[in-house]
Image: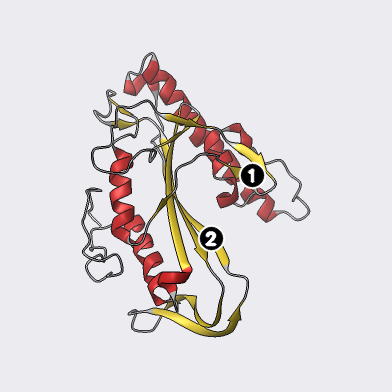
Amino acid sequence: MGTDGSKISSSSANDLSNQQPSQSDGIIARAVYDLFKAKAALQNGAERVKITMSYLEIYNEQAIDLLVNNKDDDADSSSAPTILQVRDTKDGVTIPNLTHHNVSCPNDVTNLIHLASKKRATGSTNMNSVSSRSHAICTLNVSIAPNDSVTEIEGGMDDDNSSPRSLSSSSDQNGMKAKLTLVDLAGSERMKRTGAEGARMKEGININKGLFVLGQVVSALSEIGQRSGSSGAHIPYRDSKLTRLLQDSLGGK
């Protein structure tokens, strides 16, 4: 992955040898690479494992799809944003009409992040000439089809750190679904220091709101973990769009 999020072409979606993260790459590049490495190590992984990616931003407490119509490098980053509705269902919080792209290698993820970044809301303040004006959530959804007599991936690496450690399983009848959520939070702002006014001030207020409620949620969850009999305590997930969308990732139902 490019450290600047730039597009990298891959000669083969299944060839991970030229897609390893460099020493300067961060946790996102490494986590994505490990995900596809685990897929490749799973028996019949190419056929059994499907990974899709979505990317949205939370701008002024509105969820906006950053990958809609992003089919190539010529996608119009100036087009009107696609505002998403957030729904509560029996399966939890869902986002109807959110764009999901199939991804088959780390480079696919990098390219989509690069395209999404063109639509990410930015602006200038006294503290930063190119300041993120939104929080962003990138989600990789993983589904593994059932398979009989397969070698399943177990967390961790072999002693030589060269390949994922594995264990044998006689059957895998149910399959599995999981997701990896990557969150890019905008930094908190003090209006006096940023000199924000008008629209910039509104953006800053909503950025701070999301961060404040996230802190409240984490604090409340921590208190529940330290006390017994508090499972019914109120957790303010719904007080911000950020925490509502991250509810299942944070431990809520």
Q: Is residue 74 left or right of residue 163?
A: left
| Eye-nearest disc, 2 or 1 | 2
* Residue beneath the point at 49% across and 36% down: 211
Using the image, determine if residue 169 lies above or below residue 204.
below
* Residue beneath the point at 31% across and 39% down: 117
* Residue beneath the point at 39% across and 13% down: 198
Residue 126's spot in the image, x, y percent? Answer: 27, 23
Which one is in front, 81 or 124?
81
Which one is in front, 224 or 166?
166
- Residue 178, numbered label: 2
Q: Looking at the picture, which amino acid does disc 1 mark?
A: Ala
Q: Looking at the picture, which amino acid does disc 2 mark?
A: Ala
- Residue 220, numbered label: 1
| Secondary structure under the numbered disc 2 in the rendered image | strand
Please tell me how crowded label 1 is: few (under 14), some (14-19), or many (20+) other residues with Cα within 10 Å. some
Give the quarter of the figure containing the N terminus. bottom left
